[in-house]
Image (cartoon, rainbow, N blue to C red):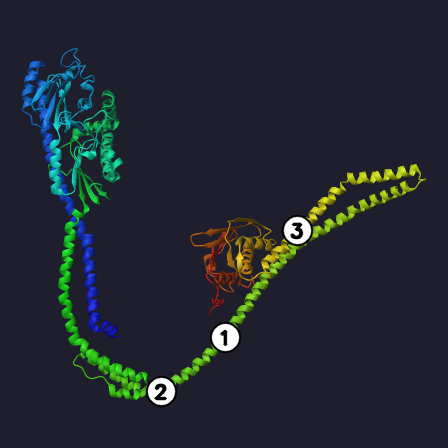
Amino acid sequence: MRGAGRLGSITTRMLIILALAFALITMMVYWVIETQGKPRILAMTSETVVETGNEVINSIMTSINHVDGLAKATSAIAGGLPKQDALYKEAFNNLMSQTDQRIVGGGVWFDPNTYTEGRDRKSFVWMRDQSGVMQQTERYNQVLQTPNAYYRDWWYIPAMYARHDHCVWSRAYFDPVSNQPMMTCAKALYDSRNQAFDGVVTFNLLLDNLDTAMKKWQEKLGGYVFLVDLDNRFLTFPDQSIVTQVTENNPQGEMVTAHQLAEKTPGFAPIADSLDSINQTLIDEAVAKDENRYTLAARSILSTTNVGKISEQESKLLSALLLLNIDQTFNLVDSHLVDTIDVPNDFVLQEPATAFVFRMPFTYWKMVIVKPNSDMMSVANALSNQLIQAMLLGFLPILLLTAWVFRHYFTRPLKRMASAVADMGALIEQKQYQKLSDHKLPNSNVSEIQIISDQTNQLIDRVVENEGALAEINVHLEKQVAARTQDLQQAMDELKASQVQLVRSEKMATLGQMVAGVAHEVNTPLGYVRSNMELVGDNLVRFDELLSHTDQLLQALKTPDANQEQVAQLMDQTLQCCEEIKADEVSEDLADLIKDGLYGVDQIAELVLSLRDFSRIDESKVKDVDINDCINTSLVMTRNNLKSMAVTTDLAPLPLVQCNPSQINQVLLNLFNNAAQAIKPDRKGELHITSSVDEAQQKIMVQVADNGQGINESTLARIFEPFFTTKKAGDGTGLGLAISTQIMEQHGGSINAHSAVGEGTTFTIILPIQPKSRENKPSQALFES
C-alpha cells in the first residue's frame, strides 16, 4: 500500500511524465540520427571513399599514361626509320636501356613481308636479364624456338584492329623470369610514308608496385582494395594465394578471374556479378554503337589468334574496347565510380561490407574498394552515443529540480487535503453524514487548492442537507428494481417458450416436406412392384395350363388299357404347351419381372434406411459422424424435390466429427430444399456439393452451390434473420436458415452465403474437427430484443 501511494503521488507522476517525455525525445533524436543523420554521414563517408578511389585511379593512370606515351613515341620513331637493322638496333637499344625498371621488356614486331619481302618474322625485342639489364633477343625470329608466330598472338591481333591512338593492354600474366605479375602494352605501328600497317610496338610493364600501392591505399581507407583487368582477372589482391592457380600451361602460376573466385567462395559472388555486369554493359555499348564493326572485330580476333590463347569472352571485350576507346577521354576531375554493392557477409572481412567499383579509362581495368559497414558507421555511432549521453547528463539536474518544486508547492498541501478527504470517506462509508461538517477542508495559500477546498465544502453541505431524501429514494428504487426484475424474468420465460414453439413449427414444416417426398418416392416403386406382380400372376396361368396337360398325360400313362392314340394326343398337347411357353419367353419375362420387383423393394428399403439414418431415433444425440454420410442421406430424403436438377458431388475423405447427426441433416435438408426452390421452372437446375478438410485449421468445409436466380446484396445481408423470407405467405416461416445458424453455432461452426444475381448461390458450412466442449455452454436465443 505504501509503494502504491508513492507511485500515485503527483510528484512521482510528474517525474514519470518528464521521464517519458525525455524518453520520447531521446527516441525521436535517435530516430532522426538513424534515419537522417547516419544516412548522411554514410553518404559523406561514401563520398570520401569515392574521392580517394578516384585519386587512386588517377595515380595509376599516370603510370599507364606514361607507358602509353612511351608506346606512342616509339611507334612514331619506328614508323619513320628506314628499314635497316643497324638503325633499329641502335635507336631502340638506346630507348630500352633508358626505360624505367618496371618495364621489363618490349620491342618492335613487324607484320609478315612488311620489313623484308618474303620474310615471315622480323622483330627487334629487348628483355631484362637476371641482373636487370636490357638485352636484345632473336628468339622470336626463329621458327624452331617459337613455333607459334607472334603475329597471331593474343596481344598482336587486337593492336592491329585498334582504331585509336592508345595502347591495347593485354590480360595479366606472370613474368617467367621474375615470377611477378605483368601486362603488355601493344600499339599499332604505321609506315610514316603511306600510313600502312607495319606491325606492333610493345612494352611489358611489371605490376609488382601495384600490389604495394594497393596496400598503402588499403591502410588509408580501411577494408581492402584490389584490381582486376579487362577480363576481370585479378591484378592484385590482399592474399595473392587466393587468386593464383598453377595450370599445365602456366606452371609458374596465373591469376584467376573474379567469376572463378566466386565459384569457390560464394561470399564474393555479389562483387563478381557486378564486375561481370560492367563488362556486359561495355559489350552492349559497343553493339549499340556499331554492331557490324564489333562483330567483325570479335570474330577476327578469335579466329586469327593462336588456338587456346584467347577466349571468346576476351575477344568480345577487346573488340568492345577497341571500338569504344576512340571516344575515350581522361579527365582528372571526372568520377570513375561505376557501381556500389552491398555485400551481406564479405568472405575476407567476415562481416557486412560495401564495395565500390571504379573503372579506368582506356584499359577498362576495375578497382574495387571493400569497406566494412562498421567502419563507415563508426563516426555516426560515436556521434549518436555522445549526443544521447549528453542528453542524459543534462536531464538529471532538471529532474531533481522539478521534484523539489512539486514537493514544496504542490505535494505537501495536497497531502493535507488528502488526509481530510480520507477522514470524510471513512464517515461516508459508516453513513455518518451529519459528522461531515466537522471535517471540512482547511484554507490554503495555493489558489487552485483553495478552489478545490471551497467546492468540496459546498458539496459536504449539500450531502448533509440531502441525506434524508437520498435514503427514501434508495428504498423506492430497490422496490422498483425488484418489480422490474420479476417482469423481465417472466418475459424471458415467455420468449423461450415462443422460441421452442417456433423451432418445432419449422421442424414440422421440414418434416412435412420430407414425408411428402418420401411418400412420393415410396409410391413409385410400389406401383411398378404391384404391376410386375400382376404380370407374374398372368404368366403363372400358362404354367398352370402346362401342369394340367402334364397331369392328364400321367393319368393316361398309368392306365393299363389306355388308348395309345389318346396318349399320343395328350402328349402332343403337352409338348405344344411347352413350345408355346418357350416361344413366348415366359420364363425370361418372369425372371425380369421378379428382378424389377426386387429392385423396387430395394429402393423402398433404401428410403426406409435413409429415413431411419435421417431421424437417428436409435442413436444418441451426439456421436462421431462422417459428414459425407449425412450429405448422402439428406440427398436421398430430398430426391423428390431435386428430381428436376442435375446433382453432382465431390466429396473428399473426411475425419469423423463429434456432432448431432439429426441436426446436421436438418441443416443440409434446408439448404437442398432452398436450392431446389431457387431454380426457375424454365431453367435446368444444377446442384453441386463438395466437402473438404482444412488440416491447418482443423476444420471441415461443405459447400452447396446452385445455379439459381441468386440473391441481391440487401437480401443476402438478412437471410439469416428470424422470420425473414422472400417466399409467398404460407410457403415458408423464415426460420429455416435462422435455425440452421443456431445449430452451427451450437456445434462450434458457422454457415455463410455468397451469391451473384443471375448466377447462383453458394452456402458454406464449417465444422471444427475437434470441437470445444459443449458442456455447460449456454444455449443462444434464436431471437434477441
Q: Quadrant of residue 24?
A: bottom left
Identified by mark 1, the residue type is Ala
* Residue 331 visible at all: no
Q: Name the residue type under label 3.
A: Asp
Q: Position of residue 393 (x, y in %)?
A: 13, 62
Q: Nearer the viewer, mark 3 or mark 1?
A: 3
Q: Check disc 2 and report the residue beneath it.
A: 469
* Type of amino acid at the residue the image marks with label 2: Ala
> Image height check: is 351 above or below 780?
above
* Quadrant (top left, top right, bottom left, bottom right) of the N terminus: bottom left
Look at 5% across and 23% down and name the residue there: 97
Compute the Cα span from label 3 to label 2. 84 Å
Q: Could you give the CA–CA distance between mark 3 and mark 1, rounded to whole angstroms? A: 52 Å
Q: Position of residue 695 (x, y in %)?
A: 44, 52
Q: What residue would you read off at disc 3?
A: 602
Residue sticking out furthest to the right = 561
Q: Are marks 3 and 1 in contact (CB under 8 Å)?
A: no
Up the image or down, 487 lies above or below 267; here it is below
Q: Residue at x 27, y 85 (%)?
A: 460
